[in-house]
Image (cartoon, rainbow, N blue to C red):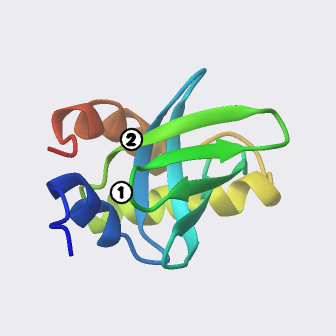
Amino acid sequence: MSQSTARESALHQIKTGDIFHAAGDRASLICLATSITEATIHARTVTHGLEFKFDRRTGVGRELKYSMSGTIDSVAPVPPAIHDALLSLDFKRDNWDGPLSEEQKRALLFVSYFYPENPID
């Protein structure tokens, strides 16, 4: 039995409902884990609702509708208020009711520096 890497260990800590970051080939991907299997992390981007399937060992993922790919690069937990604001973005995407709230704007600004400062080792 082989020892898992620190990366694999971090990826296996992701649970349904967690928010994490992936570097996409064309975008920064703020993802909400929607379900987890032994091999796959199913996730949806909170801003556009794109459905990704990430390999739980490597963190490499694919989105089939637009042929996008990405790699999970940070699983650092955000503070609860930021987490809630990002969840509200996911809800807002399906129930658009006007401009972003101040909390949502702050959350997007926060993750723009937080995730790069907290990569998977």
What residue do we see at 22% from left, 65% from top? 9
Residue furthest front in the image: 1
Of the 4 image quadrants, the one containing the C terminus is top left
Residue 54, x across and y down, in percent: 54, 55
User: Would you place residue 27 above or below residue 94 in this image?
Assistant: above
* Residue 118 picture quarter: top left
Q: Residue at x 34, y 40 (%)?
A: 111
Residue 4's x, y, as percent?
A: 20, 64
In the image, what residue occupies the spot 68% across and 63% down? 91
| Foreground of the two, 113 or 57 | 57
The correct choice, above or below, for 27 with respect to 120 in the image is: above
Identity of the residue drawn at 65% across and 44% down: 62
View extreme (top): residue = 26
Residue 56 shows in the view:
yes
Q: Is residue 21 left or right of residue 95?
A: left
Mark seen at residue 106: 2
* Viewer can see residue 101: no
Q: Amino acid at mark 1?
A: Ile
Q: Nearer the viewer, residue 70 or 84?
A: 70
Q: In the figure, is residue 48 to the left or right of 96? A: left
Do labels 1 and 2 touch, CB within 8 Å?
yes
Please state, as top left, top right, bottom left or bottom right, where the N terminus lies in the image: bottom left
Which label's residue is closer to the chain start, 1 or 2?
1
Give the residue type that dot 2 points to: Arg
Q: Which residue position is annotated with label 1? A: 82
Q: Is residue 114 left or right of residue 25?
A: left
Q: Is residue 37 above or below residue 92?
A: below
* Residue 113: percent from left, percent from top: 26, 31
* Observer-nearest of 23 and 78: 23
Q: Secondary structure at mark 2?
A: helix
Q: Residues within 10 Å of mark 1 (few under 14, many from 20)?
A: some
